[in-house]
Structures are given as structure tokens and as C-alpha cells.
């Protein structure tokens, strides 16, 4: 079984949750932090958002004129429609694809983003090898995924985190050491790691938590693991 076999579940989720393009919000902590990681590696020749979702980072790179070639993949055709609308009037190269089998030749991109995707894969290691394969020597991968040690958010939720219901696809959390070990096994050098963002339950101020996360020293208890890795030149 491959993640392609779960496509119907992703299409249903896309119709319910990603029917409209994301409304740009530079203060939204996840977007702001991921974009800052991407932006410091621009301009580049070729950028790939592997698992592009609603297209927010494709649109941001296009508006910044950050890459001569901008490409995005997602397993859901419906999500790609939303990404296409988000990026308009720019026209990135959008391809329906499973991260475990990217439809690109080796060494095509010098910057690859993979944000909140690998936690949904059936075969995480194959997905990471694919991300490494399409990077050019010296190229950079920015990867984010869910942190198993999100202790602040667990405390806010009294230990009972809500998970999305109604979608039959995998969802796992990772320890940071596990993520970095898998990336190294895929042939990448890990350059930097961090965690960021705390999620607020209803009744708690999300903006306040975002501001707190932005100003406190680097920590390891955020909801999201961020890793910058490079393919050896």
C-alpha cells in the first residue's frame, strides 16, 4: 500500500478545508516562521514546495520573484486548484504527486520546502529520500513536521489534544532526533533545527501565544519541528 491509496480521503479533506485560498496573514506564526526560513535562501534558480497545500508559499515566492522556476506538488487535485488560485496571476508548475514518488528527475531544485507533510506518509523514509534525490548538490531542504514533545500545547489542552476526525490517513508526531536521523540516512547534512508555535484551545489567545513564541529564546517544546538540511555538494 502507498500513500496514493489514500487519495480519496485527501480529496474529501481538500473540499471541506481547502476550498478557498488562504488569506494572507503575515502575523500568523506558522506562516511567518516558515516563510522566514524560505526567504533567507532566496533568490534561487528552482524552488519546489513538496506538498504545497493551499499554495501560500508558492504565492509568497512568486510575489517575491524569488525563483526562476517555481513548482508545487500535492496528492490532491482539489488542493492544487486552490493553490493555483492562491498564486494567481503567477502560474507555478503544479503537479499531482505522492511525495513517496516525486515526478522529477534527479537534482532539479536548489531549494525544496516540505511543510507538514511527512507526518502523513505511510513510508516516511522513502519520502525523505525523494526530497533528497530532487535536490541539487549544495541545495537546501526546509522541512517542518509535528513535534511529539509539544509539552506547552499539551498543558494548555490538559493533555487532550484534538485530532482531525473523519479522514482516514496516517498522522504521527516525531521526536526531533528521529527526524534528523532520517534526514541523515537520506543523504542530507542537518544545518539547523528548532521548534516553534504553540496552539491555543478555544478561549485562550492565539495571538498572545504567537507573540510569546516569537520573543522567547529558542526552545524545544513547540508544536512544530523545523529543520534546515543540505545535500552535500
Image (cartoon, grey):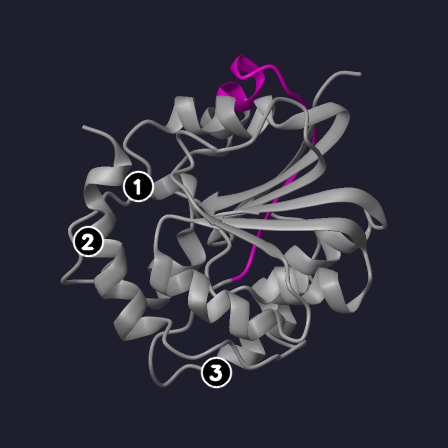
CB of mark 3 within 8 Å of CB of mark 2? no
Residue that carries the numbered disc 1 in the rendered image: 172
| Secondary structure beneath label 2 | helix
- Disc marking residue 1: none
Q: Bounds of the magenta span?
A: 181-197
Mark 1: few/some/many CA within 10 Å (<14, 14-19, 20+): few
At horizontal 62% and vertical 79% (from top left) the residue drawn is 25
Residue that carries the numbered disc 3 in the rendered image: 205
Q: CA distance from mark 3 to mark 2?
A: 35 Å
The relative height of residue 24 versus residue 126 in the rendered view (above or below) is below
At horizontal 19% and vertical 53% (from top left) the residue drawn is 8
Q: Position of residue 231 (x, y in %)?
A: 70, 22
Q: Does residue 2 show up? A: yes
Residue that carries the numbered disc 2 in the rendered image: 8
Q: Position of residue 68 (x, y in %)?
A: 80, 50
The relative height of residue 141 versus residue 50 in the rendered view (above or below) is above
Q: Does residue 177 show up? A: no
Front position among marks 3 and 1: 1
At horizontal 20% and vertical 55% (from top left) the residue drawn is 9
Residue 97 lies within the magenta run: no
Q: Position of residue 71 (x, y in %)?
A: 62, 49
Amino acid at each position: 500500500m502507498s500513500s496514493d491509496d489514500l487519495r480519496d480521503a485527501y480529496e474529501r479533506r481538500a473540499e471541506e478545508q481547502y476550498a478557498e485560498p488562504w488569506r494572507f496573514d503575515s502575523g500568523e506564526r506558522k506562516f511567518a516562521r516558515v516563510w522566514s526560513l524560505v526567504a533567507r535562501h532566496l533568490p534561487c534558480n528552482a524552488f519546489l514546495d513538496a506538498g504545497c497545500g493551499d499554495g501560500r508559499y508558492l504565492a509568497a515566492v512568486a510575489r517575491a520573484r524569488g525563483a526562476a522556476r517555481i513548482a508545487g506538488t500535492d496528492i490532491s487535485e482539489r488542493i492544487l486548484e486552490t493553490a493555483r488560485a492562491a498564486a494567481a496571476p503567477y502560474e507555478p508548475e503544479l503537479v499531482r504527486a505522492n511525495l513517496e514518488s516525486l515526478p522529477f528527475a534527479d537534482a532539479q531544485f536548489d531549494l525544496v520546502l516540505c511543510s507538514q507533510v511527512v507526518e502523513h506518509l505511510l513510508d516516511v523514509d522513502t519520502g525523505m529520500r525523494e526530497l533528497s534525490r530532487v535536490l541539487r548538490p549544495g541545495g537546501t531542504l526546509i522541512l517542518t513536521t509535528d513535534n511529539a514533545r509539544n509539552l506547552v500545547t499539551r498543558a494548555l489542552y490538559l493533555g487532550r489534544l484534538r485530532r482531525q476526525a473523519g479522514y482516514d490517513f496516517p498522522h504521527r508526531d516525531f521526536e526531533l532526533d528521529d527526524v534528523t536521523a532520517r534526514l541523515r540516512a537520506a543523504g542530507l547534512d542537518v544545518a539547523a533545527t528548532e521548534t516553534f508555535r504553540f496552539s491555543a484551545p478555544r478561549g485562550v489567545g492565539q495571538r498572545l501565544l504567537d507573540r510569546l513564541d516569537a520573543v522567547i529564546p529558542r526552545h524545544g517544546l513547540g508544536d512544530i519541528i523545523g529543520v534546515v538540511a543540505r545535500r552535500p555538494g
